[in-house]
Structures are given as structure tokens and as C-alpha cells.
Image (cartoon, rainbow, N blue to C red):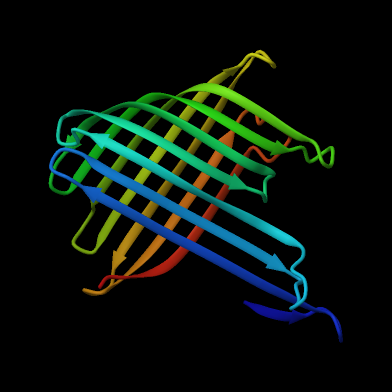
């Protein structure tokens, strides 16, 4: 948090809170994964009243991988999400599918997943204040994920999702591509430098918003 002067008695105050918490339980036959992320950004606030929320985004994703050691395994998943900076008030989904291990070597692994899900979204219309547009779509969801050790000090992870569903109201197919790519550079036994790129592209958004959004982050990762 910080403030920067925008006039003699009118400083611009800035506060950003970010929370990331992941939990995993790996049993002999199955795995359970809970991913959580929340980012909250405020500007121009004072001790009496918080105002001018610029960005608030987050998600909670729970996934179960049944018979994880098999070449062909099964997945169940559910998620709740919001991205108020883009006008997404609520997104919920639930589904299941198959996971195929394309490559499982010591230094590299590649997985392909395909399945079906039910998705509910609530968007704020940027062209009409106070109007909320909802959507309920049955979608095909597909992904490919990779993890590779490039050298003793460099490793990479990536996952790309492709989801598509037919919107009967508009009589169109809505396609969404999203992904994350990260690079880890090991500095020593405790510290690593991590850079991450994430993006989402929608060809037919439910409300008129930016089709392509992305984020690039860099940081230091500490291992205990």
C-alpha cells in the first residue's frame, strides 16, 4: 500500500491485497486438489469509507483425480469465480471427464483432459448500468498440461484450456481459450525466481468486454 500526491490536499491512496492458498492430498489411488486465489485493489480510500474499487478478482477450484496412476484416469471438478474488473459478478461450474497421460518421464510429463461441464455466469452490462446478464451453458471442456525440467536450474509448467458451448438464445457457439505458463529459475537451494503469464480469449463474450485479457507476474519463491 502507498499514497502518491495528486494535489496539496488530495493524495491518491492505493491498497492491494492478494491471497493464494493451495491444498493437495495425494492418496495411493486418488488425488484431491483445492486451488484458491483472490486479488483486491482499492484506490482513493480513507479511514472512514472505502471507495473506488478498481479490481477484485478471485476463484476457488476443487478437483478430484480418480485412479491417478492409470494411463487413463477420471476427474471431477467444481469452481466458483468472480472478476469484477471485467464485470463478471459470478461464475460457477461443475463437471467431469477423462484424463490421459500422453507422456510420463522423469523430467517431462504431458496430460490431455476432456470432459463436459455445466456453467453459470452473471455479467454486469457495461452499456446499461444496473443490468445483469445471465448465461447457463452446457460446455465441452478440454485441456493439455505439461511439466518439464529444462535443466538443473530451470523448469516450466503450463496448462491450456479450450471450452465451447452452444448458446441457444443467440444461436451461436461461444468459445473460450485460457492458459497459464510459468518458468522457474532456481537461484539456490532455498530461492527461485518465478515468472508467470496467464491469459483468456473469448470470441463471443456474453456482454461487450475486451476479448483478450492477460497478466504477467514475477516474484521470488522461497522453499522451506
Judge left or right: residue 175 versus residue 223.
right
Judge by depth and name the residue closer to the eye, 122 or 165.
122
Residue 189, above or below 140: below
- Residue farthest to the front, as pictured: 48
Where residue 212 appears, as percent x and y from the top left, is: 61, 41
Where residue 223 appears, as percent x and y from the top left, is: 27, 70
Q: Quadrant of residue 207?
A: top right
Q: Quadrant of residue 71?
A: top left
- Residue farthest to the bottom, as pictured: 8
Residue in the picture at 72% in, 68% down: 43
Judge by depth and name the residue closer to the eye, 29 or 170.
29
Residue 2, above or below 88: below
- For the N terminus, which image quadrant? bottom right
Residue 32, above or below 136: below
Residue in the picture at 25% in, 74% down: 190
Image label count:
0
Judge left or right: residue 114 versus residue 66.
right
Judge left or right: residue 128 versus residue 214.
right
Where residue 21 appears, as percent x and y from the top left, is: 40, 59
Residue in the picture at 38% in, 54% down: 182
Where residue 11 appears, as percent x and y from the top left, is: 79, 80
Residue in the picture at 15% in, 36% down: 69
- For the C terminus, which image quadrant? bottom left
Amino acid at each position: 500500500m502507498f499514497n502518491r500526491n495528486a494535489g496539496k490536499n488530495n493524495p491518491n491512496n492505493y491498497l492491494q491485497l492478494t491471497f493464494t492458498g493451495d491444498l493437495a492430498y495425494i492418496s495411493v489411488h486418488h488425488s484431491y486438489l483445492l486451488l484458491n486465489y483472490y486479488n483486491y485493489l482499492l484506490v482513493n480510500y480513507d479511514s472512514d469509507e472505502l471507495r473506488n474499487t478498481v479490481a477484485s478478482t478471485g476463484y476457488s477450484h476443487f478437483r478430484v483425480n480418480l485412479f491417478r496412476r492409470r494411463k487413463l484416469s477420471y476427474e471431477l471438478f467444481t469452481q466458483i469465480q468472480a472478476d469484477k474488473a471485467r464485470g463478471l459478478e459470478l461464475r460457477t461450474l461443475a463437471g467431469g471427464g477423462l484424463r490421459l497421460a500422453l507422456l510420463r518421464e522423469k523430467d517431462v510429463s504431458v496430460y490431455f483432459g476432456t470432459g463436459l461441464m455445466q456453467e453459470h455466469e452473471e455479467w454486469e452490462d457495461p452499456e446499461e448500468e444496473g443490468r445483469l446478464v445471465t448465461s447457463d451453458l452446457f460446455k465441452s471442456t478440454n485441456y493439455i498440461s505439461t511439466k518439464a525440467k529444462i535443466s538443473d536450474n530451470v523448469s516450466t509448467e503450463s496448462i491450456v484450456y479450450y471450452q465451447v458451448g452452444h448458446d441457444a438464445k443467440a444461436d451461436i457457439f461461444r468459445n473460450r481459450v485460457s492458459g497459464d505458463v510459468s518458468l522457474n529459475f532456481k537461484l539456490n537451494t532455498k530461492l527461485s525466481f518465478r515468472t508467470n503469464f496467464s491469459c483468456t480469449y473469448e470470441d463471443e463474450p456474453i456482454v461487450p468486454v475486451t476479448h483478450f485479457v492477460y497478466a504477467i507476474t514475477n516474484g521470488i519463491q522461497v522453499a522451506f
